[in-house]
Amino acid sequence: MKKIIVAVILLLALCLNTLALASCKKDAKDVDFVVPEEGFDTSTPVTITFYHTMGQNLRDVLDRYIVEFNKIYPNITINHQQVGGYDDVRDQIKTEIAVGGQPNIAYCYPDHVALYNLAKAAISMDNLIASEMTVTRQDGTTETLGLTQTQIDDFIKGYYEEGKQFGDGKMYTLPLSKSTEVLYYNKTFFDANGITPPTTWDEMEQVCKRIKEIDPDSIPLGYDSESNWFINLCEQLNSPYTSATGDHFLFDNETNRNFVAKFREWYQKGYVTTQEISGGYTSALFVKASTEAGNSYMSIGSSAGATHQRPEKSGGSYPFEVGITTVPQMDAANPKVISQGPSLCIFNKSNPQEVLASWLFVKYLTTCVEFQAEFSMASGYVPVIKSVNNNEIYKTQFLDKADGGDNIAALSIKVGLQQEAAYYTSPAFNGSSAARDQVGLLMQKCLTAQTDDVAGMIKKAFEDAVAECKYQAG
């Protein structure tokens, strides 16, 4: 009973907060920020607040580049604050929007911005990006306020396009640092047994079968995110998942039910497990010694978590070498792989100079090669602009040293960069996070449920997931 009461209270709080956001909409400025004719005033001090989730090592990098930014624009003071995790940032801003106290800039995921858009709190950046206005820097040099075509083309396309996934064609975010999913595998074991890393899901099934023949007590594959697994397959099969407009929740269809049924067979054969089913990140199974029952030889997880996929050294060396490759595809000729990691959004403010200062800082962080390179090396995230690969320090002191041991983070990023053309992002709307949660829960249930009517169970699980999504979206 106590749990039910707590759940009801939390649900009511969520509803009230959402209503508060929606009620702000009638008084909010339009999302299309209009660049003032006078442009940015470099002579008047302006302070902007930036919410993020950075740990100390990344804050150190940020602080160094704020110093460099202030050499260009000394009148702009950057007040940056770590606000817990990504959801903590969202929740704090959601509360602050209701009273007009939101920051100027924030780390964000697409579903966060969809929530902010209920109150028209996040601006669209289109007019800023397109602006040809000239801004004079402290040293007398000038720059274009907006993005040049060269700068736009330098962004990894899939990362840049994420900012437009809100159903109205407008640009609400710019990417800061990104991760993706990669396939980690025990290269020592694969080489010893003549196994080639799989590139397709059909090949993956055969590899899992072969590994079970060699080591019957193992679980060949661990997949950390059930939600990502489901969404990836929708994209790879070109099957509906969600839409930012109209009927939002489209994932209940025969194609999707069929692939879930197929992966249930894999689970029942002991080929695969997931984070929620195994009770923790599947990297814990991957780094186990092969002499322990329940170990795995492959793990699909975040490219930013590479160091967690590396076993501890024993006697001064690693028990096995880790290989990293791209995630399996339904069609290797038409690859699709998920894009994750924080972007930056800018909030409406009564003072347009604050918005312009915020834009100049966002532009700096996302297009500065040196910052992107150093931030990538410190975080393990993939840089969002392609020109970082030509940075001499990044190339020679980081990427060129990539291996499956001490320099595994660099190897993971190299593989992430190889998937550049395959990145996609899902539509963002109020309720898109519910869809993500529900398809993950659906995968867990369908893989593990004990039943004689598998088709009926899967059909009901899909129907229930869609119903819950619609309920949560209101």
Image (cartoon, rainbow, N blue to C red):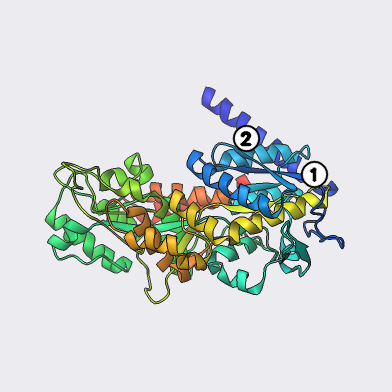
Where 259 sits versus 60, above or below?
below
x, y (%) of residue 220?
A: 23, 54
Residue of label 1: 24
Task: For label 1, count other residues whose C-alpha is less than 10 Å away and answer few (under 14), some (14-19) or many (20+).
Answer: some
Type of amino acid at the residue the image marks with label 2? Leu
Answer with the quarter of the image where residue 427 lies.
bottom right
Residue of label 2: 11
Picture disc at residue 352: none
Please tell me which residue is depicted at 14% across the width and 66% down the height of the picture. Answer: 194
Q: Element type at marker 1?
A: helix
Q: Element type at marker 2?
A: helix
Whole-angstrom CA distance, mark 2 to mark 1, is 20 Å
Task: For label 2, count other residues whose C-alpha is less than 10 Å away and answer few (under 14), some (14-19) or many (20+).
Answer: few
Where 309 sits versus 254, above or below?
above
Residue found at the far bottom of this picture: 333
Image position of 244 (left or right of 282): right
Where 144 sits versus 353, above or below?
below
Q: Between residues 465 and 334, which one lies in front from this camera angle? A: 334
**Residue 71: in sight, yes or no?**
yes
Please tell me which residue is depicted at 64% across the width and 52% down the height of the picture. Answer: 69
Type of amino acid at the residue the image marks with label 1? Cys
Residue found at the far front of this picture: 139
Please tell me which residue is depicted at 38% across the width and 50% down the height of the picture. Answer: 446
Earlier along the polypeptide chain: callout 2 or callout 1?
A: 2
**Residue 474: in sight, yes or no?**
no
Q: Between residues 370 and 238, which one lies in front from this camera angle? A: 370
